[in-house]
Amino acid sequence: MMLGLDTSKKQGIFGTYVMLWVSSHVLVYASKMPGAPQYNATSVVLITEAVKLVMALAFYRRYDGNAAQLVREVRGSTDLLLQYVVPALLYCVYNNLVYVNLTFFDPGTYNVLMQLRIVLTGVLYQLLFSTRLGRNQWLAIVLIMLGCVCKESPKLFGAAGRVPSALSHAWVLLAFQMVCSVFAGVYNEKLLKKDGKDGRRVGTNLQNAYMYLNSIWCNLAFLILNGTLQEAVHPDNLRAVFSPTVLSIVAIMASVGMVTGFFLKILDSVLKSVASAVEVLLTTLLSTLFFGTPLALADVLAAAMVGGGVALYARPAGGRAAVPSPSESRLRKMART
C-alpha cells in the first residue's frame, strides 16, 4: 500500500493533515497581503493554542475519562507535563515565524523551501529511535529535497549568481524555523510513544493538552518579553483577529494541531515530512490559481521529482515486502495501541 497507508484511518489522517496545512498557508498569505487588516501574529497563535487546549480536553472527556480521572492522570504524569515545555517552546517559535515568513514568500515558495528540513528529520529520527531508514527511503528523501530546490532555483539567485541581499534575512529566519520544526516534531513523537512511570502510556488527548498548555505560557511570555502584550489586546488588533479570514486561520490551525498529535502517534515524523512534500504540489497549484504565481518549467520538473520521491519512499527494497527490524516492529506495535 502506498506509503504504508494500509487502513482508512491512516489514509484519512494523512489526507486531512495535508489539506489543513495547505489551506492554512494560503489563508495566512492572503491575510498578510497589502490592504488586509494588520494584526499581531502572536495573539493569533495564542488564541489558536487556547482553542487547541479546549479541543484536547473535550476529546479527553469524550473518549478517555471524566474530570476525576483526568486529575489522577495529571498527578501521575507531572514529569511528562514538564517535558512538554521543550517542544512547546520550539513550536511557539515555529508558529510565530509562519506569519513572519509568509510576508516574504508566497505560499508555494514557502512550502518548497521548508522541504529542506526533510534530510534533518531523517537523521534525527534514526538517532532518537535507534532505527534505520532503508536505501530507497534515503534516495526518496534526497530526491524530494532536490525537487523542492529545483522548483525555486530560478528565484534563489540574482543575475550576478549571488543570493539577493533582500532575501538573506528572510532565509535565515526560514532556516531557523526549519530547525525548530524538526526538533519539535521528533521530540514530540518521542514523548507520544514513551511509557509512563508505571508502565502505562499517557493518552494522546492528554499529551496534546500538555503541549497546548505549555504553548499558551510560552506565547504569553513571548508577548510580555517582546513588549507587545498591550498591542495584542488593543481593540484594533482584536477587531482584525476576529475577522472571518483570521478566525478561519485559527480554526484550521487548531485542527492541524489535533491531527498532528494523531499523525505522529499512528504514523511517524518521516511520513510527516513526505506529507509536507505533497503539500508543495497542492500549494503551488493553489498559489497559481488564487494569487497568479507563475508556473514555470522548474515547477513541472519539481513536481515530477517530488512525486517520484514519494513513490520511491513507498517501494520496498529489492521489489518485495521489506522485513521490519525489531525496533521498527516495536514502533509499529506502539503505534497500533
Image (cartoon, grey):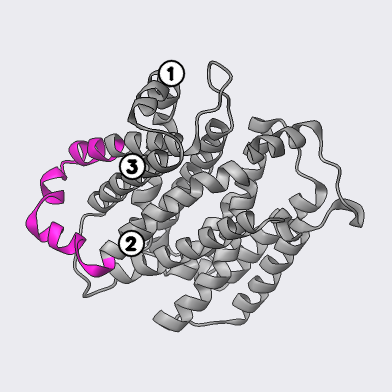
Q: Are marks 3 and 1 in contact (CB under 8 Å)?
A: no
Tell me the mark number nearer the camera, choosing from 2 and 1: 1
Query: Which amino acid, by three-letter code, is at mark 3?
Result: Leu
Which comes before the other along the chain, label 3 or label 1? Answer: 3
Residue at 42% x, 70% y is: 106
Q: Check disc 1 and report the residue beneath it.
A: 76
Distance in Å between CA atoms under marks 2 and 1: 35 Å
Q: How busy is the neighbourhood of tag 1: few (under 14 within 10 Å), some, or many (20 plus)?
A: some
- In this view, 279 is above or below 336: below
Q: Nearer the viewer, residue 181 or 56?
A: 56
Distance in Å between CA atoms under marks 3 and 1: 19 Å
Q: Nearer the viewer, residue 291 or 190?
A: 190
The question of residue 177 being in magenta is answered with no
Tell me the mark number nearer the camera, choosing from 2 and 3: 3
Horizontal side of residue 15 vs 46, given as left or right:
right
Which type of secondary structure does the marked residue at label 1 adopt? loop
Q: Check disc 2 and report the residue beneath it.
A: 249
Query: Which amino acid, by three-letter code, is at mark 2?
Result: Ile
In the image, residue 177 lies at what x, y percent?
Answer: 44, 48
The segment highlighted magenta reads 218-245
In the image, residue 157 lies at what x, y percent?
Answer: 52, 67
In the image, residue 210 lies at what x, y percent?
Answer: 39, 33
Residue at 23% x, 50% y is: 43
Residue at 38% x, 39% y is: 61
Q: Nearer the viewer, residue 316 or 89?
A: 316
In the image, residue 74 lies at what x, y percent?
Answer: 39, 24
Is residue 105 visible in this depiction of the protein? no
Horizontal side of residue 15 vs 147, given as left or right:
left
Q: Check disc 3 and report the residue beneath it.
A: 53
Which comes before the other along the chain, label 2 or label 3? Answer: 3
Query: Which amino acid, by three-letter code, is at mark 1?
Result: Gly
Residue at 35% x, 47% y is: 55
